[in-house]
Amino acid sequence: MQRLVQLSTFSLLASGLLLVAGCARSVEPNAYTRAANVESLRKAFGAGGTAEVGPAAAVAEPTGWATIKGKFVLQGQDPGRTPLKVDKDQAVCAPGGKQVYDEALVVDPNTKGIRDVVIYLSKKIPSDEKWEHADYLATKTAEVEPPFDQKNCVFLSHVFVMRSTQKVLIKNSDPIGHNTSISPSAGSKAASINVIIGANDSTMYEPKGESSIPNPVACTIHPWMSARLLTRSNPYFAVTAPDGTFEIKNVPAGVELEFAVWQEAAGFLSKASVNGTEEKWTKGRFKRTLANDATEEMNVTLDVSQFVK
């Protein structure tokens, strides 16, 4: 009996569709109507229930803006920095015999704050006034300030983040030439460059694509020189200061957001203590829903074991 009811329901639905098609051949049904008809038939024939079609699910939109800020600190003994071999142009690169050190992990000796931790929104979002604050929309294609500079054969910004739609001046403040090379990582859509920049000269860089991980920056003339450059399509990112602090203003509120956390010596961080609570981050990702006009505080402690390999 139930099978007969299913077949009868299917026949009535199919006849209704044929009548609609016969009376309005010149009107192409939209994608939602086609999907609804298919779902109705599927339910009537295969599920044995009453075919019902509800309204399309609403897409969540931000309710306003919020701020996320905090500090990254190291738990455990600072492993220290490795001295680098400077064997060329020493008068400029190591004036007075100054020792140059690796910058993959730089820890403040007083606060144990970790410099150059990158935190950024990892998922694509719409580029409109509901998702992007007016202050960010106004600078979407602007030139980044300050420029990406190099002095005494060291990149002054070891980790640099910018929007993929912006441009940045790459400067050489040394009295000798440098060869600046940006080599995008696998999957990165940012433009690569490999250019000689003469003494006290500069060149403009436009990435025109984003990357999911900071790309290596190097100077082949002075091989100890290194930095990282991350380009993102949205403006929600930060790099921690020398004391480990960061702040991202005007973040979309009222919607779930996914952030990524990366640090050169550790890569994507997998675990952290946030405000005293242990969290596990899959591939460095964590999610937050920020309240409108609120400030989300994240005091993050990272165990030294993630940095020592």
Image (tube, rainbow, N blue to C red):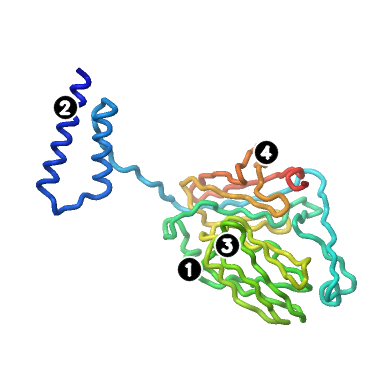
State the residue at coordinates (28%, 41%). Answer: 55
Give residue 8's position: percent from left, percent from top. Answer: 16, 27
Is label 2 in a helix, a strand or a loop?
Answer: helix
Q: Is residue 225 left or right of residue 202?
A: right
Type of the residue with mark 2: Ser
Of residue 100 and residue 85, the one placed in the foreground of this image is 85
Proximity of marks 3 and 1: CB atoms separated by less than 8 Å: no
Q: What's the CA distance linking mark 3 and mark 2? A: 59 Å
Type of the residue with mark 4: Gly
Query: Which residue is identified by label 1?
Result: 138
Q: Residues within 10 Å of mark 1 (few under 14, many from 20)?
A: few
Query: Which residue is identified by label 3?
Result: 231
Give residue 172's position: percent from left, percent from top. Answer: 71, 77
Type of the residue with mark 1: Ala
Is label 3 in a helix, a strand or a loop?
Answer: strand
Res 14 label: none
Is label 4 in a helix, a strand or a loop?
Answer: loop
Answer with mark 3 or mark 2, whichever residue precedes in sequence.
2
Q: What's the CA distance linking mark 4 and mark 1? A: 38 Å
Answer with mark 3 or mark 4, whichever residue precedes in sequence.
3
Query: Which residue is identified by label 4?
Result: 276
Q: Establish if 115 lies above or below 88.
A: above
